[in-house]
Amino acid sequence: MDETIINGINTVWVLLGAFLVIFMQAGFGMLEAGFIRAKNSSNLIMKNFIDFCFASMVFFLVGYAFMFGNGNSIIGFSGFLLLDAPNQSGIPLYAFVLFQAAFAGAAATIVAGAVAERMKFKVYLIYSVILSAFIYPVVGHWIWGGGWLSQIGFTDFAGSTVVHTVGGSSALIAAYLLGPRIGKFNKDGSPNILAGHNIPMAALGTFILWFGWFGFNAGSTLAVGDGELISLIALNTCLAAAIGGITSMLAVWGRWGKPDLSMTMNGILGGLVAITAPCAFVSPGAAIIIGALAGIFVVYGVVWVEKFCVDDPVGAVAVHGVNGIWGTLAVGIFGQKALGLAQEGLIFGGGFTQLGIQLFGVLAVVSFCIISMGIVFKIIKSTVGLRVDKMEELKGLDIGEHGIDSYSDFQLFLTK
Amino acid sequence: MDETIINGINTVWVLLGAFLVIFMQAGFGMLEAGFIRAKNSSNLIMKNFIDFCFASMVFFLVGYAFMFGNGNSIIGFSGFLLLDAPNQSGIPLYAFVLFQAAFAGAAATIVAGAVAERMKFKVYLIYSVILSAFIYPVVGHWIWGGGWLSQIGFTDFAGSTVVHTVGGSSALIAAYLLGPRIGKFNKDGSPNILAGHNIPMAALGTFILWFGWFGFNAGSTLAVGDGELISLIALNTCLAAAIGGITSMLAVWGRWGKPDLSMTMNGILGGLVAITAPCAFVSPGAAIIIGALAGIFVVYGVVWVEKFCVDDPVGAVAVHGVNGIWGTLAVGIFGQKALGLAQEGLIFGGGFTQLGIQLFGVLAVVSFCIISMGIVFKIIKSTVGLRVDKMEELKGLDIGEHGIDSYSDFQLFLTK
Amino acid sequence: MDETIINGINTVWVLLGAFLVIFMQAGFGMLEAGFIRAKNSSNLIMKNFIDFCFASMVFFLVGYAFMFGNGNSIIGFSGFLLLDAPNQSGIPLYAFVLFQAAFAGAAATIVAGAVAERMKFKVYLIYSVILSAFIYPVVGHWIWGGGWLSQIGFTDFAGSTVVHTVGGSSALIAAYLLGPRIGKFNKDGSPNILAGHNIPMAALGTFILWFGWFGFNAGSTLAVGDGELISLIALNTCLAAAIGGITSMLAVWGRWGKPDLSMTMNGILGGLVAITAPCAFVSPGAAIIIGALAGIFVVYGVVWVEKFCVDDPVGAVAVHGVNGIWGTLAVGIFGQKALGLAQEGLIFGGGFTQLGIQLFGVLAVVSFCIISMGIVFKIIKSTVGLRVDKMEELKGLDIGEHGIDSYSDFQLFLTK
Amino acid sequence: MKLIIAYIQPEKLTDVKQELYAQEVYKLSVTNALGCGQQKGFHKFYRGVEEEVTLLKKVRIEIAVNDNFVDRTINAIVKGAQTGTIGDGKIFVLPLEKCIRIRTGENGNDAIG
Amino acid sequence: MKLIIAYIQPEKLTDVKQELYAQEVYKLSVTNALGCGQQKGFHKFYRGVEEEVTLLKKVRIEIAVNDNFVDRTINAIVKGAQTGTIGDGKIFVLPLEKCIRIRTGENGNDAIG
Amino acid sequence: MKLIIAYIQPEKLTDVKQELYAQEVYKLSVTNALGCGQQKGFHKFYRGVEEEVTLLKKVRIEIAVNDNFVDRTINAIVKGAQTGTIGDGKIFVLPLEKCIRIRTGENGNDAIG
Ligand SMILES: Nc1ncnc2c1ncn2[C@@H]1O[C@H](COP(=O)(O)OP(=O)(O)O)[C@@H](O)[C@H]1O
Ligand SMILES: Nc1ncnc2c1ncn2[C@@H]1O[C@H](COP(=O)(O)OP(=O)(O)O)[C@@H](O)[C@H]1O
Ligand SMILES: Nc1ncnc2c1ncn2[C@@H]1O[C@H](COP(=O)(O)OP(=O)(O)O)[C@@H](O)[C@H]1O
């Protein structure tokens, strides 16, 4: 009887987590749409819906098999369509699949913001299917499916690397190959403001992401136990987000004289990304330090990306890429054996072992994503073409790709 | 002790479901308001709030008694105000009432979209109280309260018929009797575009509905058990939604040359409606087929409704009516005895028995709703009148009915 | 084993509650931003984010220690940074801290709406840190931390006093000292309309708050038990909200001839605030009466506040202040011994004892907040200054304080 | 050449455009406007406060025409916009000295059409 | 007849309307505008980028009047809109050849009011 | 004095402003407009219905200038807005009788700049 009850509770917990992570799609959609111009916002949201639709389909069909199937240390290869799919999660297969499919969708959708306002919709479909059917599950297999990175002791509790670094580095290469939006950079390389059209909507997205992230991190335990671990994770998640918002606000305030709301929201998200890998292995105090630095990294990350004339309208690279890496490394710095990590982190006297593994692992993942997605985009570029034409970009992708404006009754004033 | 714990868990699960279903009101509100013109959006949301306010009040006062009270096979008749109310749900009465009241609210609110932009607010109040106090509980009694449909083996797990077909067919008759919005159809019967004013808001609504639907379907087990069944339901729900979005996008893309976001969202919702009845009785593979067809039905349903010059601004008939019926039938086609259905479905060799019962039952419900709501609306029409006057319709119901614009600081450009 | 399981379930429940309460920040943000003018909406949301960021940080650092630490009957004084923090909640410390920090954030954010559109951002930061680090925890200590009010039998189940009256009375003194927005009152003291710029967004906020309130109230049990109590609380919460919406709509309709959506939403929230204290001690019937009166109090409260030329753009004083008091008193009127209250309420023959204690307690809290926050604001006023300058107020605080418009692509028409 | 400015009821824009097309006037520019005139305003209600609104939603049309087109343009606008109720709007005719087509630099009567 | 166009600060619209009413000028049309002149712009900040904004929010008023109303109309606008600080705005007066009331087809001086 | 009205493509506003500045024309007013001319419209699709859109987004510029500035202003606008494709826009020149600076009450040629 007890076992049934425990299975029941654990399933409730993971399903709650899955629902929350799926709801994060709304968060990504609102955040990213709010940060771009009105004329492209339906296009962004369409991508958002459809990448999750495809992600959950292909994860069911093949992704789970690549990620958690029996295979070698590079890739899994059993359990397609979930037929005889292995399941070591301790919870019902279908609950686990749903939870994992939600993660795959999150990784795919991160890129949407970075390529916003100029990528062809068709291209987005192709790339996003490839990412969620193949790239993400392969990296997932390495780290969570018993693959080579997990074998050398690489640890990523809830996905700073698996989800966010994958998303963030794919976003970087995509934005780079795609080129900046018309009008983003002047001839001398200095950036212009292409302001987000609906900051309150972006704010709502950020709140939804914060809310959903509790499911993302605390759900990743896959078990409730006596409640201690999930409590720690939930508190760490909240504190890292909160301090990330504070430090990013202060950084932007100090540097440019005004507390920028959009950066503050990015800082909150940066804190959340950074705490994702270490959330189970660190104390609340460490979570605060991790989040505080994340908030600062976001601000400078955003500026730094623009230095290279890479145009990332929503800050996906800084939030998910930079802080995905930072969070992964933080495991090796602040992680504690007492909390279940294999080695003590750097500041607890464990030396550089874990940190080295973390660094090596995350670099491997970054390289894999940049190379494989780079090849994918290069092929698409020389066949279908990546960008909509100039006229369409000026008029907006909502009309161009989908036939209708996002805000039909409103007078928009669009001079760029 | 074990029993207390199990009761506790089950209550947590059903309450979580109830919270999510109540939150779906926000989804309906945002979706429907986003799909209509700015000048009527507060009116729509007001209906949305107030129908749920009334639904939960009247369900508490009389609806529960009609639905779950002891009575005959047509209607229940004990437990008014929940005094000595019978409760066979296995969970605390109050949790069950809240969950069911949330369902009643959903049924009522479905109609709001179909009658948007022209129905008098007072009329909406009257109709919605009648629907949630009487029509819905009666149908509910037939199917879930031990009434005649349940006695002949009609099966609707989470409400494709009870909630969505009731809502959808009431929407149809209401929209028909009300007549189209000014400017919707040309003299030759061809439709014009009266575009939704805030597609991102509608998208948010769709995401919220998707999120809430997990509570709607998986909560309907009323028990957690070992977690297997709720996992199956949750996964089925997600897959049907995802594929519904994909097929509707493809259908609209193929037919009109552009992937329309509003139709894609309707397709997702169509998939959700269709999987609602069969979610517990079918495999994920079947859920995909059910959702895939639902997505296509939505697209053609929307066009088909307009063929008759019935003006349904948000597609409520196609989404909830057509796919409520489809989902109900799907139980008889794809249902499995192994998953607890009384008979095998058609494709599992059970023949047409279950399918026949399903068809009969859903037609009975459609007829009941169309006739009873038809009478209600006819009476209102010849007394209070259904529509606002032409000037008010042109100026917008926000000002006309409630005294204030939805978007006071924005320049709107309203030429229709 | 059983105990582990029960701890696990209880933790799941409280964490779910905490997530929902944290999500309420989004509700407050959308509601308040929607009720003010477009030119100040990012400023409001920024306050919303940052007060919660600070609230969770300072609650972790010192607030918990003041509130639940060992100390005297006025203030706690152990467990700073949660080091050796006492925990009598029966659930893991970190879960309890998160839940309580979310409450502290709610109290702080209530004020944001009342001081909207004119208070300096810096001032808001200072005040909000003081409120969540000190004022709120002290009151919390009195009532929930074993302090003097709890010793005399004052009872506030989920925070009508601790959260809402604290927030509402701080809002009152803040709005009073700050003075009205330019253009709000004519020379003769009669008010003008400064209409909310995005009522659908405010509606979304209200729905989110309603959703989150289930966590607020039902989560406050800190335990699931056999599910009966949490079911009662959830149903009471829903009914009070629903009837609050109905009565406020009717009141405003009867008085001014149109059913005002913004007042209806305030009525729903008023119902929620009022049921917060008594939710566990009253029957659903009583919840309906409490909510019904709350809806009416909100309408007259809003008008009454304006009589004194106090400008509260979102109705925070009427919703949280007036109904926080009303809810607190309602415990003494409708509370039942059978449901765990120390004394029967007035209508159950318990006489005026409990009611008297409630009245005394809530007045003590109001006085404490008004005096202490009054001093805080007075000091700030005479040093930093409370208000932005006139030009900035006219142009909007979004540009003035944060550097960017909320709705860059939209044509706004701002003549006041 | 003349510049014709007309204020009409927003919902009449489609009709006016059709009448103009029927008269072979294909070029026009439109802006969103608010107008106040004989037409009665209405009352707003919000949170217990009532206010009169006198500026009503209008659409402003601007058409540059050659002199021989002035009358048919005016007639077309009147035909499309007239309902006979207060608030139908006004037409103003201004002298236009020059007209240049940006694309070609063309000037005068040719540039107008 | 003249057509008077005025650009004013948005927050002055109510005052200007009141002054016009006091002078018995009841009819006017308003559009949303942006203006750039001597008034200094301001700086926007967004995600680490700074930009100067020179187009500021203004309100554009258009009033058709008979010749004998020109001066009082101008004076009323000046009275309502003047603060003495840069950015107060401009008034332009154009010759108006014709004025037609759409509702009645009335023409000329009668149609204006 | 003349009042110059120009309709241009929205994305050309920045260029036009730059050219005007280069010609020392610093003052101008801008409104949002929709225009219909030779430029082909496009098709909207929504929920299975297709519709032609003929009113396209334009920006309307209004500049009051002294007579000796008319040509350079026109040239600057043409230079900034011309792409050679249909839809580039039009410039209209109207006689301007009076110009008043609200701030100072100044009148005529001085008030314009
Ligand atoms: N003298 C005027 N100057 C500017 N605009 C005017 C003038 N007269 C009328 N209008 C515009 O025409 C609209 C309709 O005028 P109104 O007096 O309400 O109706 P009618 O012309 O039918 O009597 C007004 O709302 C305003 O926009
Ligand atoms: N020559 C002009 N042409 C068009 N609009 C003008 C002209 N001069 C001024 N304006 C309008 O008047 C507004 C105020 O002018 P500005 O030069 O800033 O102030 P002031 O007139 O007090 O010196 C401008 O923002 C612009 O909209
Ligand atoms: N006669 C006219 N009256 C008013 N506006 C006009 C007129 N002709 C052109 N316009 C404006 O100029 C814009 C461009 O004109 P269009 O005919 O499309 O291009 P082109 O001038 O290059 O042939 C139109 O969209 C409209 O706003």
Image (tube, coloured by chain):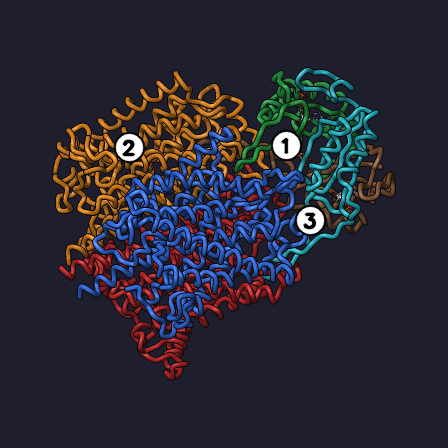
Chain colours: A blue, B red, C orange, D brown, E green, F cyan
Element type where label 3 sits in the image = helix
Give the amino acid at mark 1. Cys
Residue C158 horizontal/vertical position (percent): 24, 41
**Chain letter for the residue marked with disc 3 in the picture:** D
Determine which of the numbered discs, if any, sits on residue D14 in the image: 3
* Mark number displayed over residue C165: 2
> Does residue C355 appear left or right of residue A288 in this picture?
left
- Residue C121 against residue A81 in the figure, above or below: above
Q: Residue D36 carries which label?
A: 1
**Label 2, label 3: how far apart the Cα atoms are:** 55 Å
In this rendered view, identify the residue nearer to me: C348 or C397.
C397
Mark 1 sits near ligand 1, with its Cβ under 8 Å away: yes
Q: What residue type is labelled 3?
A: Thr
Closer to us: mark 1 or mark 3?
A: 3
SS type, badge 2 = helix
User: Can residue C34 be seen by looking at this rendering?
Assistant: yes
Amino acid carrying mark 2 in the image:
Thr
Q: In this view, does F103 lie above or below B337?
A: above
Near mark 1 (Cα within 10 A), the count class, few <14, some 14-19 or many ≥20, is many
Using the image, name the chain to which the residue with label 2 belongs: C
